């Protein structure tokens, strides 16, 4: 009798998690989940199964101990008037061993469960489990880092306020197997994410009914957009110098074939136009690289004073040709900034180069720097100021747009590509900084870079 009851107890307890094992096999067999999603989902399900096995161990162990307890008085009362039946005598050692074995297996399963949970925590893609009421029951570290907090056991809407994701989750909980949704989050910068929602069939230890994984597809989408932008912008900006080159080539092969003076003049113009095209391509490629990584903030520490000294020294000769003096007014000590040195050098190179181009002859370009008192987080600033004709206020808001120029003819005459300030803006976006522009007509302009101070 005891043996029969214990056997049926084992069958009844083991059936649910055996069904869960079949679910894993089905998911992989259908190819429903791919890549890290499949690995993550499998690990999540393994944790659920391990939890079910652990619960099974405990329940079977409890059943064995209850049976032992009921037989215990019979074994202890050897002098009792009621003799111990042969079946009980045979079952007692087996139950004792079963109790001991299940205790041992329970310890092993707890260890394996902890290892599986650690593996889920280490998965780079954000993962969560939700129950049938759409409440979060489990989340890994990547999810907490992306969303800011785990929010267990809150409704999914408290973590992701996106109607498309919530609707897809509801559809999966209602019976669909897989849903994929693309959406955007805007904190701290805009990121494009793909959510994959898969249903978990059968019972689980903590009531999980679906697994949601997020993939960052920002770089992929931006690469597609940048390819389209590059073709459109490059075609527009390269058309003029290319037309000029073709015109002069045709002239040199025709009317000016034997005119040495015209040939020298035309070759000089052709070299200038070819240089303009080369600068334009360099700026477009630089902007593309920066935008591709804009959503990933740099973590290195950069000393700004050496960067500013180096950039100013590189532009001294060009400034001297126009009688312009570059004056650095930097404090003795300046906190390091959080950033990437080469990109910050490009920021100040572009700003100083513009100042030298547009400042009045025989004037001064000034570079100052300091820290923001009481700012949270702590900030470092550097300002490039020029003595120029200034910029009308209606143009200030658009200066960082691609190919936007206040004076097209003058910009092209000075060799500008229309991308310098756009590059500055996107570099500062990546650094979680900003650019402030102020200008007074007839006096000059200031461009102030704000960067996070290194912790």
Image (tube, grey):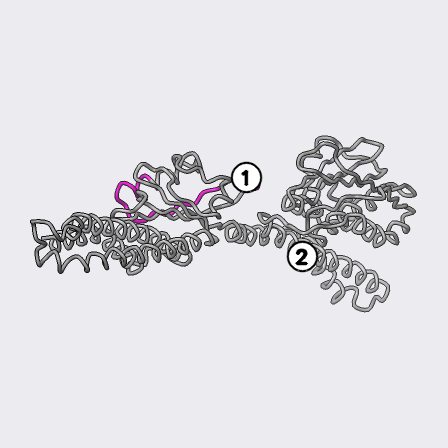
Residue 303 in the image: above or below residue 371: below
Q: How many marks?
A: 2
Q: Where is mark 2, residue-wise?
A: 281
Answer whether residue 187 is magenta in the image.
yes
- Front residue (pair 383, 389): 383
In the rendering, at what x and y percent does residue 412 appear?
75, 48
Q: Quadrant of the C terminus?
A: top right
Q: How many residues crowd mark 2 within 10 Å: few (<14), some (14–19), many (20+)?
A: some
Residue found at x 30% / y 47%: 199
Residue found at x 39% / y 57%: 39
Left or right, 340 with respect to 51, comes to right
Residue found at x 25% / y 57%: 22
Residue found at x 53% / y 52%: 219
In the rendering, at what x and y percent does residue 5 appear?
13, 51
- The residue stretch that appears in magenta: 170-189
Answer whether residue 383 is magenta in the image.
no
- Find numbered disc 2 in the image and state the secondary structure of the residue it sits on: helix
- Front residue (pair 425, 127): 127
- Front residue (pair 63, 145): 63
Q: Nearer the viewer, mark 1 or mark 2?
A: 1
Asked whether the residues under the numbered discs 1 and 2 touch, taking CB atoms below 8 Å apart as contact, a structural biologist would say no
Q: Where is mark 1, residue-wise?
A: 187
Q: Quadrant of the rendered structure where residue 454 is?
A: top right
């Amino acid at each position: 009798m005891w043996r029969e009851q214990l056997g049926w107890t084992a069958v009844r307890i083991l059936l649910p998690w055996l069904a869960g094992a079949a679910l894993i096999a089905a998911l992989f067999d259908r190819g429903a989940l791919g890549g890290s999603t499949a690995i993550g989902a499998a690990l999540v399900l393994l944790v659920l199964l391990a939890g079910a096995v652990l619960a099974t161990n405990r329940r079977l162990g409890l059943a064995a101990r209850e049976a032992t307890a009921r037989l215990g008085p019979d074994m202890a009362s050897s002098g009792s008037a009621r003799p111990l039946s042969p079946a009980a005598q045979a079952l007692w050692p087996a139950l004792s061993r079963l109790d001991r074995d299940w205790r041992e297996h329970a310890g092993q399963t707890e260890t394996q469960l902890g290892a599986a949970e650690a593996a889920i925590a280490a998965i780079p893609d954000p993962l969560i489990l939700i129950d049938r009421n759409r409440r979060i029951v489990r989340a890994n570290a990547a999810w907490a880092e992306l969303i800011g907090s785990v929010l267990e056991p809150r409704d999914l809407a408290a973590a992701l306020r996106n109607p498309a994701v919530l609707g897809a989750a509801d559809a999966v909980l209602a019976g669909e197997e897989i849903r994929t949704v693309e959406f955007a989050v805007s904190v701290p910068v805009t990121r494009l994410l793909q959510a994959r929602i898969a249903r978990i069939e059968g019972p689980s230890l903590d009531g999980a009914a679906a697994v949601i994984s997020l993939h960052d597809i920002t770089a992929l989408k931006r690469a597609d957009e940048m390819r389209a932008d590059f073709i459109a912008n490059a075609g527009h900006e390269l058309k003029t110098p290319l037309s000029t080159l073709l015109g002069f080539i045709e002239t040199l092969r025709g009317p000016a074939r034997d005119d040495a003076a015209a040939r020298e003049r035309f070759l000089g113009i052709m070299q200038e136009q070819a240089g303009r095209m080369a600068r334009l391509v360099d700026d477009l490629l630089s902007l593309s690289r920066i935008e591709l990584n804009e959503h990933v903030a740099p973590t290195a520490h950069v000393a700004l004073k050496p960067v500013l000294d180096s950039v100013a020294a590189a532009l001294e000769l060009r400034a001297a040709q126009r009688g312009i003096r570059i004056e650095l007014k930097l404090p003795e000590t300046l906190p390091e900034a959080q950033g990437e040195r080469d990109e910050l050098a490009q920021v100040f190179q572009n700003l100083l180069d513009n100042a030298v181009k547009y400042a009045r002859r025989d004037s001064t370009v000034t570079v100052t720097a300091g820290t923001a008192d009481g700012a949270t987080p702590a900030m470092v600033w550097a300002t490039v100021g020029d003595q120029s004709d200034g910029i009308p206020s209606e143009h200030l808001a658009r200066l960082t747009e691609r190919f936007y120029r206040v004076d097209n003819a003058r910009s092209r005459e000075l060799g500008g590509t229309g991308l310098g300030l756009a590059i500055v803006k996107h570099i500062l976006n990546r650094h979680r900084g900003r650019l402030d522009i102020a200008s007074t007509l007839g006096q000059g302009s200031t461009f102030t870079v704000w960067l996070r101070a290194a912790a």
